[in-house]
Image (cartoon, rainbow, N blue to C red):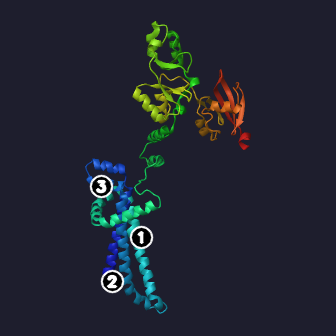
């Protein structure tokens, strides 16, 4: 019996080896393994190869676990049951069921020790020391994989055949989704591995890839542009008043943009009568283009701005490199930025927004869902659509539990809007 117990113990430890190896190789971080590989440890390269193609490895682990379990059951179910049965039979009431009771006892005891020492403890150790255990196990696992090559190939072939029968591609490997990466970033921030400012930058990058040019551009009505026939002295006055350093140049109207000028060009043009000789080439980008695509176009062209075109080829807005970078790092203010205030918050429940404030930002701040989507992209657009006309200063609408009041008009454009939380509307 002693030999049987020792043999079962060895089999349970072997089960623990396979369980720990499986957990270690699956959970160890690829980034860390690549760093170890660069440091010259070739074991890391072997672990990475297993992670790239885990099918054969999983088959080998299952062969090992199955053989260990079957052998342990065979050994335990034969000799130990035979030895225990006479002791149980000595109890008169249990004598008729001695062999069955002995079998149950053996199964329960072996199962308990297998779960604790052959599964739970090894896997928890592997989770805590994934990298070191993966590197330690990869050598023995490679040897076992070589010895069990034929059974492994047979099992892998059978598994692939079944997957094909049920319509699942066996060769596909799951890719890491952006949501999983963002979750890891948040976890890293909570654990102190990633700084809050780094989390904001990473989140900004993910948001950046989902945005379109029309989401960040300066709308046509807010563009400060110059007619090509403008006197340089007048252009300089406009530049000083606006605070900008680059200006689109058009011929006749804003749908005929012919280029742009830098404030230095305007200074050099003071002896001339117009801006035509100093106008630089400008690029055009469709409003539906993604920000990464637009950024690639501008950086390859070595320019800072582009005109955004609508679906009819007319001028829809203006895009700058600064607009796109602000989507990642947040608002950028420099000595050339005009002094504007997009949002005021005088008292609790009261806000004053610029008309050009994106409707998505207002919705997030107020906690409301502006419908219908797609008709407007700014708060001013929401007010225009809701009123159905060009408003006058002081006109109001009540929706979503708030009163929206036109605070200031700039000719036909809504410059600012006062928003007040109304409890009566909120209860409707």
Q: Residues within 10 Å of mark 3 (few under 14, many from 20)?
A: some
The residue shown at (43%, 63%) is: 162
- Measured from the top left, where is residue 79 in percent x and y? 35, 84
State the residue position of label 1. 115
Q: Is residue 346 visible?
A: no
**Mark 3 or mark 1: which comes first in sequence?**
3
Report helix, strand or loop for mark 3.
helix
- Observer able to see residue 307: yes
Q: Quadrant of residue 151?
A: bottom left
Residue shown at 30%/66% (left/top)? 150
Per the model, the C-alpha gap separating discs 2 and 1 is: 22 Å
Badge 1 marks a residue whose secondary structure is helix
Q: Is residue 130 left or right of residue 225?
A: left
CB atoms of marks 2 and 3 within 8 Å: no
Q: Quadrant of the N terminus?
A: bottom left
Separation of residues labelled 3 and 1 (CA atoms): 29 Å
**Residue placed most toward the observer, 106 or 312:** 312
Q: Is residue 208 above or below residue 106?
A: above
Where residue 256 appears, as percent x and y from the top left, is 53, 19
Dot 2: element: loop
Above or below 192: residue 133: below
Image: 407 above or below 166: above
Mark 2 — residue? 1
The answer for how far apart the CA atoms under marks 2 and 3 are is 41 Å
**Residue count near mark 2 (Cα–Cα under 10 Å), binned few <14, some 14–19, many ≥20:** few
Q: Which residue is mark 3?
A: 46
- Tell which circle, 2 or 1, labels the residue nearer the N-terminal end: 2
Q: Is residue 297 above or below residue 14?
A: above
Quadrant in which the C terminus is drawn: top right
Name which residue lies at 33% across and 69% down.
14
Q: Position of residue 146 (x, y in %)?
A: 27, 63
| Horizontal side, residue 60 vs residue 100: left or right | left
């Amino acid at each position: 019996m002693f030999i049987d117990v020792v043999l079962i113990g060895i089999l349970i430890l072997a089960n623990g080896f396979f369980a720990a190896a499986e957990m270690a190789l699956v959970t160890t971080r690829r980034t860390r393994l690549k760093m170890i590989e660069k440091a010259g440890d070739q074991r890391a390269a072997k672990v990475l190869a297993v992670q790239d193609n885990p099918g054969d490895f999983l088959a080998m682990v299952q062969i090992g676990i199955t053989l260990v379990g079957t052998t342990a059951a065979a050994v335990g179910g034969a000799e130990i049951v035979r030895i225990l049965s006479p002791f149980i039979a000595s109890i008169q009431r249990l004598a008729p069921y001695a062999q069955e009771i002995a079998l149950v006892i053996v199964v329960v005891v072996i199962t308990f020790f297998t779960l604790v020492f052959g599964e739970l403890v090894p896997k928890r150790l592997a989770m805590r020391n994934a990298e070191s255990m993966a590197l330690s196990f990869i050598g023995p696992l490679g040897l076992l994989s070589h010895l069990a090559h034929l059974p492994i190939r047979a099992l892998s072939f059978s598994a692939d055949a079944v997957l094909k029968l049920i319509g699942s591609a066996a060769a596909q490997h799951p890719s890491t989704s952006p949501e999983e990466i963002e979750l890891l970033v948040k976890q890293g921030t909570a654990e102190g591995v990633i700084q809050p400012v780094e989390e904001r930058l990473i989140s900004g990058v993910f948001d950046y890839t989902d945005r379109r040019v029309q989401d960040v551009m300066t709308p046509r009505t807010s563009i400060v542009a110059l007619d090509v026939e403008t006197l340089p002295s007048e252009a300089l006055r406009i530049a000083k008043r606006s605070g900008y350093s680059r200006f689109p140049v058009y011929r006749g109207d804003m749908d005929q943009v012919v280029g742009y000028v830098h404030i230095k060009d305007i200074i050099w043009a003071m002896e001339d009568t117009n801006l035509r000789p100093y106008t630089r080439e400008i690029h055009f980008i469709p409003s539906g283009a993604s920000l990464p695509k637009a950024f690639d176009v501008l950086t390859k062209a070595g320019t800072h701005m582009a005109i955004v075109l609508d679906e009819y080829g007319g001028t829809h807005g203006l895009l700058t490199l600064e607009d796109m970078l602000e989507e990642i790092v947040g608002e950028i203010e420099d000595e050339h930025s005009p002094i504007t205030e997009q949002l005021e918050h005088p008292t609790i429940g009261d806000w004053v927004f610029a008309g050009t404030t994106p409707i998505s930002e207002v919705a997030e701040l107020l906690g409301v869902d502006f419908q219908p989507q797609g008709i407007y992209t700014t708060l001013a657009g929401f007010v225009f659509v809701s009123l159905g006309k060009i408003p006058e200063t002081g006109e109001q609408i009540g929706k979503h539990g708030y009163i929206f009041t036109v605070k200031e008009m700039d000719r036909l454009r809504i410059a600012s809007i006062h928003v007040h939380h109304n409890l009566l509307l909120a209860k409707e």
